């Protein structure tokens, strides 16, 4: 066999022990072909609305995927050479970026990025070749040729991937025109739903807070010069999203702190923030109050609240100024949930309409804080590993950290959190293999009956995330003509 030939092993990520691996195979077979429920991600809905062919292999595999670009950047590659911040690349530049990936491909060995891309090369594009400087051009040409075919357009791949629900991430002032057009398009039978992402509208320290709140008021037809008007505008926009299919709101801040202020104090600080004269401590206090407001709104409108704090965004200022956000320069920090969330959970934590999914990149809090919270509050669920820890070993550590306290029913289901469309099935397949690995180990150690493991395997990929995110339990019916 040529050193250039490669097919991903059917037992990848399953246990090395033969007896345990046999159990894992049985469990994985029950998960493998289930539909994909993706309740949190960053795919642009216009991708599916326009259904245009993907431009080239670089714009599909490299440019939108900060997992890929950040490691190349760490190895000295300029992000501009990868198309970041440049708009559509000319063919020669796209090919040059692909060659750079091939030149550094060995550096991805053992990473989930390589696992996902090799899955995509083989499962989606039918390639059986190892990427290298020697094979780069031929692989580029073969992928490019297939991208021009109808069966490789976004909607065809959406169906091929068996995506049942795909949630996007959307600004509160977005008119959701792409979502409305998709919902009205009888030729598209998938379900693409928006997610309410109000982060920047809850940050009073921002220099553009007045402009943001003005825009919020305009979108909601409310006067946001006062705090009560801002509150009405937020509620109106959340309802607008809910009316257009949203099932959740998504929140990311430096910390998950929540605290209630007196209404008069909140109004005073809100005015100071709009006038640009609020100090840092007061801005943090108001932000925590506004996040607590979002929890109360969630108890009123039943949007599931997802919280993923504690990331130092845009760590390198020069990179942010040149390329913008979301290019790989975000770095995790430590986090504390128990004290931070006590005000909200004492306020609405036992409200049957409230639901909170807690994500973290700080693995130390899985067993110490998140699992115990989810093990008491009916409203709280332990979110899946995401971002830097949506990786095989980290997912296995997560299962081992939380299952002893809360089992499986208090967890969120897998979250792919991706902008790279073709990586969605690869990421979900990885999670299903690791869950099979984990459950098989418990069965092999006689800590769980095989029948119970089978039941869990049947529920984890699709049934469970539907329950957590209040999605219909059956596949959506095709739109009637």
Image (cartoon, rainbow, N blue to C red):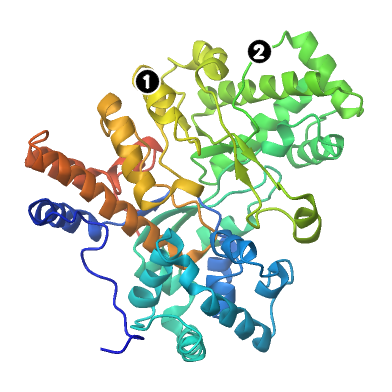
Do callouts 1 and 2 mark residues in contact (Cβ within 8 Å)? no
Q: Which mark is residue 150?
A: none
The residue wearing badge 1 is 372
Res. 39 in view: no
- Where is residue 363 drawn, in percent x and y? 45, 35
Corner quadrant of residue 450: top left
The residue wearing badge 2 is 260
- For residue 52, above or below residue 444: below
Corner quadrant of residue 142: bottom left
- Where is residue 129 drawn, in percent x and y? 37, 83
Res. 469 in view: yes
Q: Mark 2 packing: few (<14 Cα in 10 Å), some, or many (20+)? A: some
Q: Nearer the viewer, mark 1 or mark 2?
A: 1
Corner quadrant of residue 121: bottom left
Which image quarter holds the C terminus? Answer: bottom left
Nearer-N-terminus badge (1/2) = 2
Q: Secondary structure at mark 1?
A: helix
Left or right: 71, with 268 as reference point: left
């Amino acid at each position: 066999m040529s050193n250039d030939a490669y097919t991903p092993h059917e037992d990848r990520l399953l246990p090395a022990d033969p007896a345990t691996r046999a159990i894992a195979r049985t469990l994985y077979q029950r998960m493998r072909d289930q539909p994909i429920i993706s309740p949190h991600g960053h795919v642009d809905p216009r991708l599916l609305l326009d259904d245009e062919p993907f431009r080239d292999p670089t714009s599909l595999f490299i440019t939108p995927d900060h997992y890929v670009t950040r490691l190349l950047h760490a190895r000295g590659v300029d992000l501009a050479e990868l198309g970041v911040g440049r708009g559509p690349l000319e063919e020669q530049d796209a090919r040059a970026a692909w060659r750079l990936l091939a030149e550094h491909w060995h550096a991805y060995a053992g990473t989930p990025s390589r696992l996902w891309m090799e899955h995509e090369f083989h499962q989606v594009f039918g390639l059986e070749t190892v990427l290298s400087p020697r094979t780069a051009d031929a692989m580029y040409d073969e992928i490019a040729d297939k991208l021009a075919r109808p069966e490789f357009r976004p909607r065809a791949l959406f169906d091929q991937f068996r995506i049942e629900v795909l949630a996007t991430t959307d600004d509160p002032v977005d008119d959701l025109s792409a979502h409305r057009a998709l919902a009205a398009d009888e030729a598209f039978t998938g379900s693409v739903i928006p997610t309410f992402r109000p982060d920047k509208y809850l940050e009073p320290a921002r220099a553009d807070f007045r402009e943001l709140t003005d825009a919020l008021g305009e979108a909601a037809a409310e006067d946001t010069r006062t705090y009560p008007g801002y509150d009405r505008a937020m509620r109106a926009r959340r309802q607008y999203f809910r009316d257009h299919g949203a099932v959740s709101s998504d929140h990311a801040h430096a910390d998950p702190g929540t605290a209630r202020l007196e209404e008069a104090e909140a109004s005073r600080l809100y005015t100071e923030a709009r006038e640009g004269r609020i100090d840092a401590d007061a801005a943090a206090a108001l932000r925590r109050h506004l996040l607590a407001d979002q929890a109360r709104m969630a108890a009123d409108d039943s949007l599931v609240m997802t919280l993923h704090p504690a990331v130092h965004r845009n760590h390198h200022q020069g990179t942010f100024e040149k390329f913008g956000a979301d290019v790989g320069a975000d770095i995790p920090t430590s986090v504390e949930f128990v004290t931070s969330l006590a005000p909200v959970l004492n306020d609405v934590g036992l409200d049957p309409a409230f639901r909170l999914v807690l994500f973290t990149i700080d693995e130390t809090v899985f067993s110490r804080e998140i699992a115990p919270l989810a093990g008491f509050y009916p409203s709280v669920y332990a979110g899946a590993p995401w971002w830097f820890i949506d990786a095989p070993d980290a997912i296995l550590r997560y299962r081992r950290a939380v299952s002893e306290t809360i089992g499986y029913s208090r967890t969120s289901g897998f979250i792919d959190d991706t902008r790279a469309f073709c990586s969605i099935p690869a990421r979900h397949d990885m999670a299903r293999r690791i869950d099979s690995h984990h459950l098989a180990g418990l069965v092999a150690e006689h800590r769980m009956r095989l029948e119970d493991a089978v039941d869990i395997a049947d529920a984890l990929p699709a049934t469970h995330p539907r329950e957590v995110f209040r999605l219909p339990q059956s596949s959506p019916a095709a739109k009637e003509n």
